[in-house]
Amino acid sequence: MSGTFYDGELAELDNSFSAAMSANIDLLKLAIASTAESSIIGVGSGGSFTVASLLCNLHESYTGRVSRPSTPLEIICNPTLAAASPVFMISAEGKNPDIVEALDRARRHSSRTVHVLTNRASSPLMEHVRELPEVTSHVFDLAKKDGYLATNSLLMDAVVIARAYGALDSDANQFPDSLDGLRISNLPISKWLDGVREFVRQAVPRKGLIVVFSPLLKPVAADLESKLSESALLYCQLADLRSFAHGRHLWLAERPEDCAILALVEPGLEHLWARMQQLLPGNVPVCTMPLAGARPQDLLAGLVAQMQLVSLIAAELKKDPAKPNVPSFGRELYYVDLPSFILGPQETGRRGEQSKYEVLGARWPSIGSSGAMSRALERFESALAQQAFHSVVFDYDGTLCSSQRKEAPPMVPIVDQLTRLLNAGIFVGIASGRGDSIQQHLRNVLPSNLWQSVHLGLYNGGWIGLLGEDIQKQAITNEFLSHVRRILGRLEGLGVPIERVRETYPHQISVRFKEGADAENMWFVIADSLRQAGLDPTTVVRSKHSVDVLAVNVNKSHLVAKIIQARSIDPYQVVTMGDQGAWPGNDSSLLEHRYSLSVDQPSRRLDRGWKLAPHHKRDVDATLWYLERAEIDAASSSFRFKLSA
């Protein structure tokens, strides 16, 4: 059957390939590089699940980190999967209600940026992306809309992902200029297809296809199963070559008239498959798709070849797989309101205890019920509820605004809460390792009449002043920091993945690392280098993306002391908030304050620095949760926390 809508889509593949090859993938490369030391989760349905499988396949190949392609329902049912691994949500059109719900739940549980890869800048999914913090979108526009089956969108997304991994591996020139350069068994795809037409004619009447595959080629097998099953062309079952040998071969003995076999193999398993094929009964049609390897271009060749194979199968059945007659119940199944039927996970244990156990290393399975922990939490909650506060001191990155690399002011809900506090006469302090960029951002979003009530502790407390004051920059030489700078220079020369060193004499030196480098691991590298040189490593602190080496007497807690002195406030009338509360986190001194709250990692002390926000709320979300429960007493210019509300 020629001239179908599906065949028209296949005719567009070359244009989609060219568009994908010329697309700007810089942001996608950074996103993938940032996950180099992590396992990842790729999430998608249908054709997007194929892209998720390809993403995870390449990630495992290049990094050795076991990664998992998942359906949206897997994340919806168990969003804690997103708690420790970077998540990539993939949806061509962004209309799938499952992926929208999965995004919401994954973001609530992820401590990292969630990535969304899509082909539409305007969609229900992208509306949610714009509303949620710490979600980065990667939009690759598609010229023509796909039909029922994903073809051009799948190829577009597969190519940009493959290009990104290839470029990061310094192998950006591994792809042909056009689809004509892709090969199956050293043949152009069209020539290989000519040789499998007889197999298709024999297989289609049997109505069932068993696809056996090399594990390295699983994304190709997954997409073939998806297309055959979703278009009701053939019943299809998947098994890797050895799983097939563990019992599935009984189909060939007991129901040989109901099945045919397609094998996806690469050179590593060619000899194994050749021997297995010799042992198969001769009355079952068998076809082999031999790929040259499992490199990105080989996987792309397999994806395109099986799309074309589906066209041959559809033509034999006289069907158009891109234009099926979808029944009304099918549409109703697709648009079921998931939140109404799948409730979110319930909080386990008492709020705050789990994060304390985690920061103390008491994770599952050693975690237990400790009377001492429960009593400490009760004492802290009780004391916090009774205390009235006249001032609150915040960390900035990860607490008032996103901890992503790009600098941006706090989002509107945070600004609204700060304005509410300031209008009530409550003094606000903001401590950060950054400098005057923060001052400018805050001036842009806060009314000028409130500036005199906002205290800043920039460069980790090295400069302290009011929002309305100009920063006096003095490049005073500091012998300790100068020595540190020389050590960092030697580390750069040895290949330590340092992206930028920013010197802010006499306060600190900030070290930003290349994407993919783990700031926690880099802290050990830098602290140990200082120790070897006879310098004090305790002045080295870290955030989620950088390491700061502080001069002596530079400390965020100095901002708290300044507010207490300048405003004549009792120390117990100040509460502090930060995201990195356990040393060497850069908020550890801030959360040493008697009344202190964490928005992510708590202090290791049991009498302060608790994370009392729900476990799934982190960073800015947790800050908002606290502030929304701050009840203001305008008469006394104070507030109390009502966290049980």
Image (cartoon, rainbow, N blue to C red):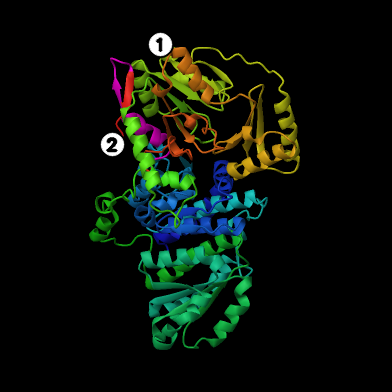
| Local secondary structure at mark 2 | loop
How far apart marks 2 and 1 lie (CA) works out to: 33 Å
Position of residue 245 in the picture relative to residue 374 (left or right): right
Q: Is residue 33 visible?
A: yes
- Image coords of residue 642 (percent x, y): 29, 31
- Image coords of residue 314 (percent x, y): 40, 69
- Image coords of residue 440 (percent x, y): 51, 19
Q: Point out which mark residue 561 bears.
A: none
Position of residue 522 in the picture relative to residue 638 (left or right): right
Q: Residue at x 69, y 43 (%)?
A: 496
Quadrant of the rendered image containing residue 375: top left
For disc 1, the neighbor class at 10 Å (few under 14, some 14 to 19, many from 20) is few
Amino acid type of the residue that numbered disc 1 sits on in the rendered structure? Asn
Amino acid type of the residue that numbered disc 2 sits on in the rendered structure? Ser
Which is nearer the N-term, disc 2 or disc 1? Answer: 1
- Image coords of residue 382 (percent x, y): 32, 34
Placement of 529 over or under 573, stated as above or below: below
For disc 2, the neighbor class at 10 Å (few under 14, some 14 to 19, many from 20) is few
Q: Is residue 94 visible?
A: no
Question: Magenta span covers which residues?
Answer: 617-637
| Local secondary structure at mark 1 | helix
Q: Residue at x 71, y 22 (%)?
A: 478
336 magenta-colored: no
Q: Which residue is mark 1?
A: 449
